[in-house]
Amino acid sequence: MPAPVSPHHAASRWPQVCALLTATLIGAAALFTGVGREGVAAAPDPGAGRYISPETLMASERIDFTAAERAIGRLRLTEHGVAEQFEAYEDVLQAVSDVLPPDADEASLKRALYLIQVGLPTGASQELAALLPGFVRYQRLEHALLELTPDGAGNAEGAWLQLQLQQALRRSMLGEEVADRLYEATYRMTEIHLVHQLVMQRDDLDDAARQNLIRRHMDALMAGHDEAED
């Protein structure tokens, strides 16, 4: 597979960006050893509502799981009670992660897990329960990564670097197999889009050369995808 088509100066930023990411991961790991207070929420009580009795919590401790419930309801399941497509779990995981407070503690996470348990059959709920803690940690670190690579929102070179770091972070936090199954389609589409942008902005190539280079890179990306599936 050819080397990434981003300009040379983009590649030169790798050491700086990776160093910043490493520092963030180390700092975040220390925070994750015990975030929040213990005993914030009462234990889930099936007899007092879907996932918790609201009167047991102060207003600042209540979490509105409505969006998460909607995502659970949209999940399409097989006859065996698991998601028809594994990547569909990402929608539920994202919805739950979004409604949890930034400093969500173990009690808040347990409430989210209980919501998943009562809202889905055993197969899907067990798969999501296994994924959720790592996904929440990944989301927190991803926010830090996006702050460290703000250029990603403004230009193709920064977006390319950001995409590669996001993928590396996903694989590190979720495991390669899980990360690839959840994000492969999104990653592949973004990668193709950025390759096209990076080639088209090269002033040293005419239109024919740009199109030829795009085809070569598309062929290489597709070949790499096919090898990964074998």
Image (cartoon, rainbow, N blue to C red):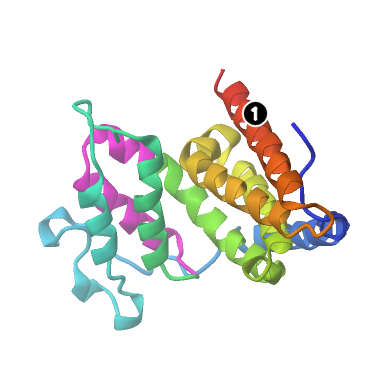
Seen from the viewer's position, the closer of residues 52 and 226 is: 226
Instruction: Measuring from the top left, give residue 214's x and y in whole percent.
Output: 68, 43
In the picture, which quadrant includes the N terminus?
A: top right
In this view, 114 is above or below 157: above
Residue behind mark 1: 224
Instruction: Measuring from the top left, give residue 100's x and y in whole percent.
Output: 40, 66
Say whether residue 105 is magenta.
Answer: yes
**Residue 44 visible to an observer of this rendering:** no
Say whether residue 74 is magenta.
Answer: no
Write down the region rendered in magenta: 103-128
Q: Identity of the amino acid at label 1?
A: Gly
Q: Secondary structure under badge 1? A: helix
Instruction: Measuring from the top left, give residue 132's x and y in whole percent.
Output: 43, 48
Q: Residue furthest bottom?
A: 59
Describe residue 210's horizontal placement relative to residue 51 as left or right: right
Q: How many marks do you count on the picture? A: 1
Describe residue 61's horizontal placement relative to residue 143 as left or right: left
Seen from the viewer's position, the closer of residues 150 and 211 is: 211
At x 29%, y 33%, the residue is 84
In this view, 128 is above or below 26: above
Quadrant hosting residue 50: bottom left
**Residue 38 visible to an observer of this rendering:** yes
Query: Does the magenta stretch mainly form a helix, a strand or a loop?
Result: helix
Seen from the viewer's position, the closer of residues 179 and 106 is: 179
At x 33%, y 37%, the residue is 126
In the picture, which quadrant includes the C terminus?
A: top right
Question: Crowdedness of circle 1 by 10 Å Cα count: few (<14), some, many (20+)?
Answer: few
